[in-house]
Every structure is written in C-alpha cells, then in structure tokens.
Image (cartoon, helix red, strand yellow):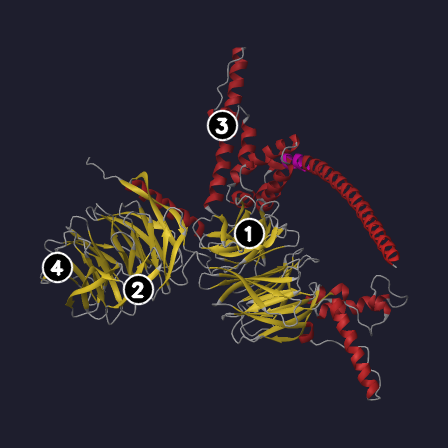
Amino acid sequence: MGLTRQYLRYEPAALFGLVASARAGVAFVALRGERGRYVAVPACEHVFVWDTRKGEKVLILKGLKEQVSSLCPSPDGLHLAVGYEDGAIRVFNLLSGELTITFNGHRAAVTALQYDHLGGRLVSGSKDTEIIVWDVINESGLYRLRGHKDVITQVHFLKEKNLLVTCAKDTLVKWWDLDTQHCFKTLVGHRAEVWGMALLSKETRLITGSTDSELRVWDLIYIQEVKDPDEPESKKSKGSPSPGTEENTEEDETLELDEHPEERIVKCSKVGSIMREGRDRVVTLGTDRMGKFLACHGTDAVLEVFSVLSEEEIQKKLEKKMKKARKKAKQNSEEEPERSMELSLQEEIQHVTNVKASSKIKSFDLILSPKGELKMVLLLQNNVIELYNLDLSAQMPQAVRVSRITIGGHRSDVRTLAFSSDNIAILSAAAESVKIWNRSTLQCIRTMECEYALCSLFIPGDRQVIIGTKTGKLQLYDLASGSLIETLNAHDGAVWSIALSPDQHGFVTGGADKCVKFWEFELVKDESSAQKRLSMKHVRVLQMDEDVLCVRYSPNQKLLAVSLLDCTVKVFYVDTLKFFLSLYGHKLPVLCMDICYDGTLIATGSADRNVKIWGLDFGDCHRSLFAHDDSVMYLQFVPKSHLFFTAGKDRKIKQWDADKFEHIQTLEGHHQEVWCLAVSPNGDYVVSASHDKSLRLWERTREPLILEEEREMQQEAEYEESVAKEDQPVVAGERQGETGLAGKKTIETIKAAERIMEAIELYREETAKQKEHNAICKAAGKEVPFPVNPILRAYGNITPSAYVLEVFKKVKSSELEESLLVLPFSYVPDLLRLFNEYIQQGSDVELLCRALLFLLKIHFGQITSNQMLVTVIENLKKTTISRVSEARDVLGFNMAGLQFLKREIEAKDEVTFFADATECFEEKKRKRKKKEKMVLAML
C-alpha cells in the first residue's frame, strides 16, 4: 500500500465586515435592564446584538448553517426567537447568549414569528404556507394549521381571546379559533398579496397593507359585545330574556348564526382606508408595543409614521368638535347638532411625519421611551443600521438621526481582497470604499473612499496600497494617513487585474481596453512637502486582440500569463514580450488563474465551471476538473505548495491538489455568490468575500484531513438531508385537514427513536437473563453472582427499567411525538408496561402521561384489538387517574399559596405607598409654614 498524502483542515475562524443582513427584521431587545438601546439584527446564520449608543457589537447568538429569516423578542425581554431558512426555530437566552430551545416543524423558511402576550406560546408562519403554534414552556409543538395557499407574511395572537389572525401572499386574512383549531373566518377584501397587518385600539381595529398605497382599516366586534340599539331588551341580554319572548329570541339568534356562521366569534367590517404617500407595495407594517404609533414603508427609503388616538383622546376631540359645531350653530341661529357626531378615520389615525433614510429600508422597529420620545431603528439594504428619535412634544415633530452603525462593513459587495506580507492586515475594497482590517481583532482600522474597485495589492513594505477601478484608474493610498496620494488614468476601460512583479520593483495591469501595461515604482518629490513619496511610472505596454481579464507573473519573472475574452490564455516572455504558449480548451472566458510557487503548473478557472491544470513548460493540459456548479470566480495557490483554492458563484470555496487532481475540502458558509478570496503569504489563513456582504476568515488547523473519512462524512450528511426530505409519517385514521402534528421527522427524531428501541431491547435481554439466573440459583440452591451489564454499571448499577426511563427523559421535549411516531409497534407493549410501573412510582407523571396519550392515539386500533394489553390498559387507567389527581392537587395548593403571597406583597406595597405619600404631604406642609413665617418676618 502506497503512502497517503496528509492534508491539514481549514476551519471557519470568523465572520466580519457585516453589520446586518437584510433577510429578516430588526428588533429592539432589553439587555442589561435597558430598552431602546440594544437592537438585534440578522447576520447571515448568526444574530448580532448592537449597542446603538456606542456602535459596538455586544452579543453574538450563533447559528448553524442556514440563514436567519425571522426574529421576535419575547414579551419579558429575556429571550429571542429566531427563525431560519431551513424551517428551524431556535430560542436564545439574551442574558447568557445560549441556545435554550429548538423547534423543528416547517419544511421551508420561517417568515413570521410572534409570541402571545404572556410569552408562553409562540406562533410561526412559513414559506411552506403552514402555521405552527408552539408551547415555549413545555418546549413542544401544539398543532399545525393549514389553510393558506401561499407564503405567510404576518401572524398575531389576540390578547383577550384565544384567537389567531394570519395573512399571506394568497390575498387572504384568516381568523383561527385556537380552542377548536380551525379557521372560522376569511377576509377576502384584497385583490393582491397582503404583505403586513397590525392590530390597534385594544384589538378592536385591524390594518392591512397590500401592493397599493392603501392601508385598509377593519373594525372588529367580538360577538358577546354586539348590541343593537334598535333591538328589544330581550334580544340584547340573552342571559335574562323577558317573559313571553324566550322562544322567539332563541329562534332569531339561531337563524342569525346560521346565516353567518363565521360571525359567531368576531365580526369584521371595513371602515375605510388610509392613503400612504408611497406608491409601491408595503414591505413592513408594524406598531410599537403600546399600539400608539403605526409605521410602514415600501421598497423606497421613506418610513411613514402615524399616531393612533386612544379612546380618551377620541372623546376629548369629539367634545371639542361638538363645542365648535354648537358655537357655529349659535352664530348662524341654526339647530344644535346631533350628539352622534363621529371622527373620521383620518382624524383617528393621523399622519405624524416621514423619516427619510440614507438608503432603501428593509425593516424597522419602534419603541416609546419613558421620556415620551419615539425611537425608531431602521435596517437598511446597504449594510447599515440607523436610529432615529422623534420628539412628540414638538409642534411639528421631525425625526432626528441619533446614531448610525456603518464602520463594521461596506455599503456594497466586496470585489477584491488582499493580505499584507506580514499576514496581519487584510484589505477589502468595494464600490465606495477601501477598508483595512486587523486580522487578529477583526477591527476596521482604516476606511478610505474610492471609486468602484475591481483589483488591489499591497505595495512592498505594506505602507501603501494600489486599487484598480472600473473607470480604468489606478488609485494609490497611504495607510498611515488614510489619504489618496495619487490617481492615474491607466486604462480606457475597467482595470480587471493587477499583479505584483516577483522582484517587487513594479507591477502589471490588464484592462478592458485590450492592453497589458507594465509599471514601476519610483520616488518623486511631493509638491506639498519637501519629502519624497512613492509614485507609479508606466514603462511598457503589450497590445492584445481581446479584452484582458487576468494577468499573472511566473515566480522567476520570466513568463507572463494573460487571460483573454476569447476563452484562451496567452503566455509571453516578460523581457521581450514575445509569444510563448497558448492555452486553449475552455468553452467560456477564463476569469481567474494562478501559477504555483515553482513555476511548473498554471491553474485556470473559467465561467464554464471547470478548472484546468496545465504544465507551463509545454502548455499541455494535465487535467480538467469540474469544480463548481456555477462560474469559477477566483483561484489562488497556497504558497509553497501545489494546493489551490477556488471560489465559485455556487457559494462554495473548494481546496484542490494540483498533483493528484483531487478535491480535498469544501468550505461552506457563504449564503450568496463568492466574488473573491485571498490566501495569506504563510498559507495559514484564507479570507473570502460574498454577495451576502460578509467577509469570512478560514484558519488552517493542526488537525489532519483524511480524504476517505471526508468522503464518508459527506455521504452521511447527504443521507441525513435525504431523510429530512422523505415523506412524513402518517397517523392512522387521521385525515389531512386543517390541523396536524406540529413536529416533523428529522435525523434527531430518528436517532431518539433508535435510542428508545435499543433501551427496550436491553431491558428485554436483561429481564430474560435475570429470569434464567433466578432459575439457576433455585436449581443450585444457593445465590450465584449476577453479571451486571456494563451500560447499566455506567449509569450507577440501575435497573433495566430505570435505564429505559433515563433514555426516555433524555429525548428533547420538542422531538418526543415525532420519535414515538417512528417507533415500531412491537416496542409499544413493553413501553406501556413500563409506563404503568413508572406512574405507580410517581416519577415524571406529566411526561409519561403525554407520551402515553400520544401512543394510545396513534396505535389505538392495534392496542384495543390486543387481548394481552387489556389488563395493562386497565391498570394504567387506575394509576394514571390517581397520580394525575395528586399532581393537580399539589399544583392547586401551590397556586393558592402563590396568590396568597402575591396579595400579601401587594397589601404591603400599598401601605408603603400611602406612608410615603403622607410623609411627602407633611414635608410640603412644613416647607409652606416655614415660607409663610419668613414672609411675615420680612413684612
């Protein structure tokens, strides 16, 4: 057997250059006892919590692979629910930053999340058109609601009623009764997608936003509140009908309910529309927590803010209006106006101001501060967070920008990266700026304005950098001062590529004007000071027939490789500029290439998704590799090796061996196209930039990478993905209707079911062995030592039945139902007998009853038809009822005790409050008497 080559693994080290992703919403979170200062934003697969006052990142809630698609803070401010693109929901503790709960139920991205007012339930809507209600306290799914035909855009719990209202892109708003888990009403008043909605005026008014500039307003009347003034008293109060009208009343009510069955719970009636100034669709529509302010924005940079009048304010305004009307009537000697005067919708919901952001708004959140200011945080499309304050006491309120978080990233995609020669500094350049980052701290240490950058390099000494731009200019920057020293018009078209010469005396550029230009560094006298400064001098030009896309020097500086738009790579002698080789074979242009450290190999990456490895001595193609699923955007060799990295539009970075033509490793993490990468001079670090606005740093570890193991791990990952995509298990006798089970089959639920099966098998084996051992002891007439199973010994010599309970308790609460659903029926009889034993002992009654009821539901037919299980079920019935009653009594006693303590504390607080008030009053009285005495003395 030949020697296997050993490689070292590259691992993700950091994500930086990203302020916030525009995929999900922004939310104010309570941290360190403060509200309105800290905001949570999505950042690819993570969630960043920013301090808006200091502009610092204070907390990172780390995700796995999938991008964040939705955020929702809990009402108590202690937790943050995060929805992901793969349909998972994770709940994080904001105090510790740790993951507390994971829910798996959706098959596509989570698009809407909302807690109920107590924070005990969480509802989620998804791209898979389904809604799931989750129990946060029990960490499990309650039920799944089906009915919408397109992506869910917003979900809301109603505080007072056990109702849920949802809207979706299918133009419908649906009302759900959560007691019966069915949709009892559908609003069909929209002609296009419903993008957002909000509940106002103590949930008596619903506002919806669609694709036009109208915000539709609906009045909500809950059925027990309906009172018709023209109706006789007997009809109004159905609890106490007047004599002789009882039968008629019941008949009338029945007829009315039968005519409008959907209006048994809530009645919706459209009252009008509020016109927005924006003409495009509503992107986000929301209110502050108190419901006093409503705001919305479209696909532009303007946030429109409205104030919603409370009942007291409406009453005051009405009285004022009535007073004016009476005065006017008196002057014109007309009759007094009727008392049934009403405010118009525009008077009840008033436009306050427009907030103009610096770029397109993607999301916002509002919070009313104790000082009476309205704080607004805006998440913008260009990687920026802006915070505005609105002073409501002003006559004409105007929003003032108080902070802006920008330094942590570029406004547009990074198109070029470079490492300094000491591996410490990283250069990144985009359409508007050049940034220098410290690799170890990941802090931005310099930001310099530039034109649209396409290529870059550090000048030897790492004190200056050169940027090649889209307009054909070369810009020279000094890092110490952070200033632009010189700008040269180098090419008539874009400067696509730049390469430093190996002797470090100059560089070469290739542009869209079909020219390859050679430049040398020189020292010139600075006009502003007597000192000399670095400059660039054009020395030679090589005219080509096609646009130049990439240029590279060979390490000995004898050859120059030039990639052209005609899909070929031409190799020239540097000294004479004579033609040496033509490398042809790619079907589309070569976008990137590199030459290895010893000058023997050249690797080319093309838009045809292939990488070709050529010998530089004869120009023969050693191997063609299908590298990526989309264009290969960047390619670079690891210094002093024949290993190279490629970056593609398929979001992946791959490492290859140019000698063995093998794929070594795939670095996955980016969520959009990868534009460029850079390998550090020592080969220990790789930095990459993507369309998702993030920069990622990858570090070479000391961990060896074995290709066979890597292939096995890849196959396992593929198998796990295929398992998740399989058809979900079906409960016998349950038809596919409006409701269903909340969970879904995942690799975790399958593993949990396998652990339960293994535990039951061990229990069976050990029980059989114990019986056999007892028979041997009886026959021998003496006690023979029984060998303990090593697994049971590891758990502290517990019994086999106790081991099954231990395994059962370790199954996550959110995965319990799905794990039992995939469990074969042959294991259920043993499990039922064990449940009977555990419940008799009084251990984990709540968990066991939940599992027992679920097993009875899904295996009802088989259990009832099995004569062997009749006695087991009878025993379970007795033990379960008695134990549950005991648990209920304990719970009732504890609740009564807590309520008593609450009343005691409230009574004490009231006494303290009145004592404080009396002291304040006495103090004021003393001060007044003292003042009066002083005034008398003066007189």
Which is nearer the eye, 558 or 465?
465
Q: Residue flagged by tag 3: what amino acid is it?
A: Glu
Helix, strand or loop at mark 2: loop
Q: Which residue, given by chain and number where applicable, does mark 2 sit on?
A: 528
What residue do we see at 82% from left, 73% from top?
229
Specify whether residue 876 is painted magenta: yes
Q: Which residue, given by chain and number where applicable, does mark 3 sit on?
A: 765
Which is nearer the eye, 511 or 792?
511
Disc on the earlier residue, 2 or 4: 2
**Which label lies toward us, 2 or 1?**
2
User: Is residue 322 rendered to the left or right of residue 432?
Assistant: right
Q: Which residue, given by chain and number where applicable, does mark 4 sit on?
A: 574
Report crowding for label 2: few under 14, some 14 to 19, many 20 or more residues within 10 A (C-alpha). Answer: few
| Residue 415 spot, x, y in % from top left | 33, 61
Q: Which mark is residue 891?
A: none
Q: Which residue, given by chain and number where applicable, does mark 1 sit on?
A: 81
| Residue 519 spot, x, y in % from top left | 19, 62
What residue do we see at 30% from left, 68% from top?
470
Q: Are marks 1 and 4 in contact (CB under 8 Å)?
A: no
Report crowding for label 4: few under 14, some 14 to 19, many 20 or more residues within 10 A (C-alpha). Answer: some
Q: How far apart are the alpha carbons under marks 2 and 3?
A: 91 Å
What residue do we see at 54% from left, 12% from top?
783
* Residues shaded magenta: 871-877
**Which label lies toward us, 3 or 4?**
4
Helix, strand or loop at mark 4: loop
Q: How far apart are the alpha carbons under marks 1 and 4?
A: 60 Å
Which quarter of the figure has residue 490? bottom left
Q: Residue flagged by tag 2: what amino acid is it?
A: Ser
Which is nearer the eye, 762 or 637?
637
